[in-house]
């Protein structure tokens, strides 16, 4: 006679559900771009999706493992519903056009893509060595008028190295030491929004909900969810 298997602890089930959800959410981001998919479907579906994300957040804060598992599974259905709706609506997943180049000083391979959506789609697998055309344009503008005038005067001329005026150090692009810049010339790095990795409860520490964007920790005006009674689930 085979011994009966012991039931898996509810906390382990909750963590496993969130791990699976995180993998699916990451795959959806690579497929559609970060925070792009809800914008491709009709408004009622997008609202339901965000409502489900908020319920998952609330379940994790409650530290009730059974509620976390239920809401994580519902969030999986929410992602799949958006994916199906976007395809039915005729939208196409991201298909980044990638150009690669090697930085001559360091040998680092960088990727150049069209826009930020494509950059976010491949940034993780390339350790952030991804540049958009807008960033390339900023770098070219930083070369100065003389470089652009030379290109205009001598069509086909190539830039071999760039140095700031009156200095011998090369302009730092890539892995070289950074060049001091004014506050106007710098912008804080944008955090990837989709992970929303805030610290949760003690019982589920280290577990995160893959939501759309980081929301401020402000008190909710909605009545608390009664997990014991059970509330309607959008998906």
Image (cartoon, rainbow, N blue to C red):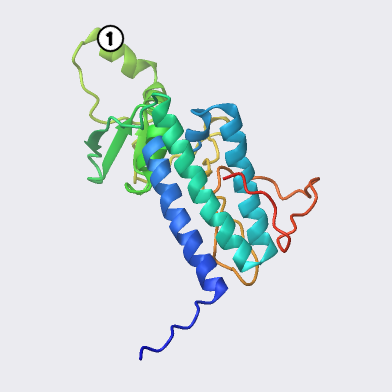
* Residue shown at 43% from the left, 25% from the top: 89
Locate the C terminus by quadrant. top right
Q: Nearer the viewer, residue 115 or 158?
A: 115
Give the farthest residue toward the bottom: 1
Give the farthest residue toward the top: 153
Q: Percent position (x, y) of residue 59?
A: 65, 58
Q: Can you see residue 48?
A: yes
Q: Is residue 106 above or below residue 83?
A: below
Q: Percent position (x, y) of residue 36?
A: 48, 33
Locate the N terminus by quadrant. bottom left
Q: Is residue 45 above or below residue 154?
A: below
Secondary element at tag 1: helix
Q: Can you see residue 173?
A: no
Instruction: Residue 229: name its quadrant.
Output: bottom right
Q: Percent position (x, y) of residue 84?
A: 42, 36
- Horizontal arrangement in the rendering, residue 157 relative to residue 118 (left or right): left
Pointer 1 residue: 152
Q: Percent position (x, y) of residue 54?
A: 64, 48
Give the farthest residue toward the front: 1
Give the farthest residue toward the left: 156
- Horizontal arrangement in the rendering, residue 179 relative to residue 232 (left or right): left
* Residue shown at 46% from the left, 54% from the top: 22
Q: Is residue 138 above or below residue 201?
A: above
Give the crowd class for mark 1: few <14, some 14-19, many >=20 residues within 10 Å: few
- Horizontal arrangement in the rendering, residue 37 relative to residue 227 (left or right): left
- Horizontal arrangement in the rendering, residue 223 relative to residue 19 (left or right): right
* Residue shown at 60% from the left, 66% from the top: 66
């Amino acid at each position: 006679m085979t011994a009966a298997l012991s039931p898996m602890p509810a906390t382990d089930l909750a963590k496993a559900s969130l791990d699976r959800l995180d993998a699916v959410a990451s795959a959806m981001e690579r497929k559609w771009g970060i925070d792009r998919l809800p914008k491709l479907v009709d408004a009622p579906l997008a609202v339901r999706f965000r409502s489900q994300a908020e319920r998952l957040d609330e379940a994790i804060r409650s530290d009730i493992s059974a509620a976390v598992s239920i809401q994580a599974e519902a969030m999986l259905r929410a992602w799949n519903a958006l994916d199906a709706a976007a395809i039915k609506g005729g939208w196409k997943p991201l298909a980044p056009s990638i150009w690669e180049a090697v930085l001559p000083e360091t040998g680092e391979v960088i990727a150049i893509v069209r826009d930020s959506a494509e950059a976010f789609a491949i940034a993780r697998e390339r350790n952030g060595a991804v540049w958009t055309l807008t960033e390339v344009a900023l770098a070219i503008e930083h070369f100065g008028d003389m470089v652009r005038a030379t290109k205009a005067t001598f069509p086909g001329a190539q830039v071999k190295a760039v140095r700031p005026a009156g200095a011998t150090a090369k302009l730092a692009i890539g892995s070289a030491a950074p060049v001091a810049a004014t506050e106007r010339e710098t912008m804080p790095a944008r955090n990837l929004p989709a992970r929303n990795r805030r610290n949760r409860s003690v019982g589920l520490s280290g577990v995160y909900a893959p939501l759309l964007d980081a929301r401020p920790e402000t008190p909710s005006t909605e009545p608390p969810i009664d997990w014991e009674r059970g509330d309607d689930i959008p998906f």
